[in-house]
Image (tube, coloured by chain):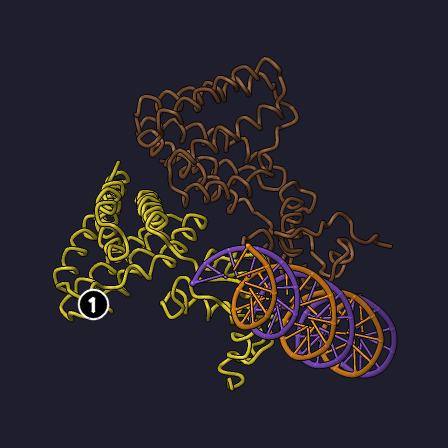
Chain colours: A yellow, B brown, C purple, D orange
Amino acid sequence: MARKNSGMRIDQDTTLGSQIYERLANQIIVGDLPPGHRLDEQSIATQFGVSRTPVREALRELGARHLIDLTPRRGGVVTRIGADKLIDMLEAECEIEGLCARLSAHRMSALEKGRLRDLHEQALAIIEERSLSRYFEINKEFHDFICAGAHNTTLDSTARDLRFRLSPFRRPEPRSNASAVMARSTDEHAAIVNAILDGAAERAYEAMRAHNARVNLGAMKILQNSEPPEQMELRAKRVNLR
Amino acid sequence: MARKNSGMRIDQDTTLGSQIYERLANQIIVGDLPPGHRLDEQSIATQFGVSRTPVREALRELGARHLIDLTPRRGGVVTRIGADKLIDMLEAECEIEGLCARLSAHRMSALEKGRLRDLHEQALAIIEERSLSRYFEINKEFHDFICAGAHNTTLDSTARDLRFRLSPFRRPEPRSNASAVMARSTDEHAAIVNAILDGAAERAYEAMRAHNARVNLGAMKILQNSEPPEQMELRAKRVNLR
DNA sequence: GCTTGCTTTATTGTACACAATATGTGCAAT
DNA sequence: ATTGCACATATTGTGTACAATAAAGCAAGC
């Protein structure tokens, strides 16, 4: 029998539905709920120790945000992101971040530029630690900061949303040299930082775009097992296409 | 007394919540439910002749899509789009459409390019009719088609979503020469079409971007009544900023 | 053996009831 | 007049019950 009240706090400023949404969204992103997994309202409800009502609201929000597919009388399943969709998302993120970099070059304040330089230097320091997970953290911060530096909440939130949904495909490849990965990444980051500090919009755009395009090739490898390889090659080109 | 069942069909392939979502979303976009308007669950429920449950689900989805602001125990109000937010959205749309134009230049098939030319020529024909509303239709189709031509569902849907939410600010200004508006617009469209047909990505991007930037200046005028004018001037620059 | 159609079962959709919280009103005290 | 508090009211949040539909299992026919 499912135990009751497994961690749902009674928070004043939130609602059970929202809390369940957060939890489920994280479970999906982390991969705990794999693509294609069916979401049964009743079992989720008992699992969280609540009734079906807040669960249903959470599911509907997950559906609105494309984290699950919601079919009218057949419930919800975690969205399967096929190769096509993945490539679209990677490309969109690549370009939108590039756009943010371009705008950042014009719009970041002196203070922000200073913080950007700090962030980059922090990343350089972390390479010594050889901690890939720690590096991923600061890397995310770096990208987030540039998207924020464009001073456009719409672009920022769409970029954030894309990164969030793409994060399952950004896990470190098992067989890869951590130091090399980090070194290459920071090199490219350096180009981006310099361009932004110089206020060189177009250069910032190109640098960010090239950086993302390269990283995205890695992300696509995760799909290679489930896809015919020739197709992937073909698509890989598209990501770099101008 | 509110009459029951005002138009909610019992459709197999949909749910009451979704239908109500659609209706409310349209009412918001059309301006029937103005920004700041409070959405009372009970009155909406009786208005549509249903219980509060599907209404709540509709509201939650509206909230997820940023059409209403949903505060935990205080219900929902139609999102107020302030000048800052509006400018962000306009800029984002401007750039994303530009991006789609750039990609379209490379990716549209010969068939699509033909259809694009047709669409443009249709628009030219419609100028003669002097029907601004009809022109708005074909104009929307034109932009939609270019966004689709990029062959990237993610970019397409974000662009579509932005245009949807921006449509309230795109209503024709009362005191304006219809023919002049249409002529100018089609001139700029011609530049975009030619660039795409030539496969000139960068030119397509620039043309689309310039076109949108100009139109956006008009959209911002709608806000001018409720905002101190000097601020608007300052912001107007930002939209054109590179 | 496989398919077709019906019956049973499981799951989602909707309504309703009650609980929890926010909002509004009036009165008293300063 | 204004502030603070208590009470009344309205509205949202959650739980539960029932209805509607889809999935699964089973029997009869080809």
Q: Give the image quarter of residue B209.
A: top left
Question: Quick check: B19 left or right of B64?
Answer: right
Q: Position of residue A151 (x, y in %)?
A: 40, 49
Q: Position of residue B224 (x, y in %)?
A: 59, 37
The quarter of the picture where the C terminus of chain B appears is top left
Chain to which mark 1 belongs = A
Q: Nearer the viewer, residue A16 or B228?
A: A16
Instruction: Decide if residue B212 is in sight here.
Output: yes
Q: Amino acid at mark 1?
A: Leu
Q: Nearer the viewer, residue D17 or B168?
A: D17
The quarter of the picture where the N terminus of chain B appears is bottom right
Instruction: Decide if residue B70 is in sight here.
Output: no
Q: Position of residue B222 (x, y in %)?
A: 60, 36
Mark 1 Cα shell of 10 Å, populated few (<14), some (14-19), many (≥20): some
Residue bearing the label numbered 1: A132
Q: Tell me if residue B155 comes above or below residue B125 in the rendering.
A: below
How many marks on residues?
1
Q: Residue at x 42, y 51 (%)?
A: A158
Q: Tell me if residue B43 comes above or below residue A233 in the rendering.
A: below
Q: Position of residue A136 (x, y in %)?
A: 26, 64
Question: Quick check: B34 left or right of A93?
Answer: right
Farthest residue to the top: give it: B128
> Considering the numbered disc 1 on the image, is that residue within a helix, a strand or a loop?
helix
Q: Residue at x 63, y 20 (%)?
A: B131
Q: Residue at x 69, y 55 (%)?
A: B38
